[in-house]
Image: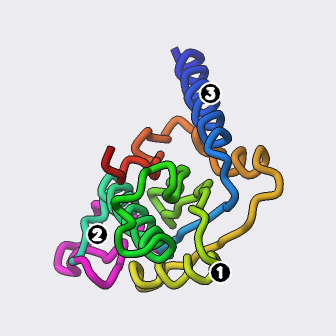
Amino acid sequence: MEHNNKEQRQRLRDAYMKLGLQMQPTAFVTLTTNDTVKTDARKKKDQGPPKALTWRHQGEPKVSEISKTLDMTRLIGEYLAMMDRALLGRNWSQVSPDQRTDGLFIIEHTKTNIHAHGLLRFPAAKTRDLEVLTLMKWNRLTQSGDTNFQSICDVDRVAEYCMKEMANVQFSSDQVVLTRQFMAA
């Protein structure tokens, strides 16, 4: 049984690798929240809930692993919207999906320091420093988050790195975030 599950995880990883490469990404982006809080049911209740993901516009989120993954997914969607608005203008949401930021993110370390690795292709726009723009937009969403933005030279190697944890038994399909899931058809 374990062998079949391992084969299924490998096939799923291979399919996401193929999809990621077909998107022709030009940038490798890592988004971190610098959340090091572990979910621990044994914590005393009088201390209140630990603050996991902290951002300026939201209330105190729950810290369960599933909740952290969903919160990170929402932050990624907000980041993508902010980037498209900066690159495409105020009518960015009406631009066809193939002309907007495209790619995928893999969320890792959901129990410890949650972060996401992304393979992205940004829309053609006026000359912009995408690294600085990414940092500015992510800092508006998180209090202590950080970014790592790199141009891609070896897309196969970068895709392998992004998807390294997909073979793990604990990996959930909720940890894969496609940019198009935030776009209207």
Which x, y percent locates residue 38? 41, 65
Point 53% across, 60% down: residue: 116
Q: Is mark 2 in CB contact (under 8 Å) with mark 3?
A: no
How packed is label 3: few (under 14 Cα within 10 Å), some, or many (20 or more)? some
Which x, y percent locates residue 76? 43, 63
How far apart marks 2 and 3 lie (CA) works out to 37 Å
Q: Main secondary structure of the magenta part?
A: loop
Q: Which residues are magenta?
A: 35-58
How far apart marks 1 and 2 lie (CA) works out to 44 Å
Q: Earlier in the sequence, mark 1 or mark 2?
A: 2
Q: Which mark is residue 43?
A: 2
Disc count in the image? 3
Q: Secondary structure at mark 2?
A: loop
Residue 54 in magenta stretch: yes
- The answer to whether one can see residue 15 in this image is yes
Mark nearest the camera among 2 and 3 is: 3
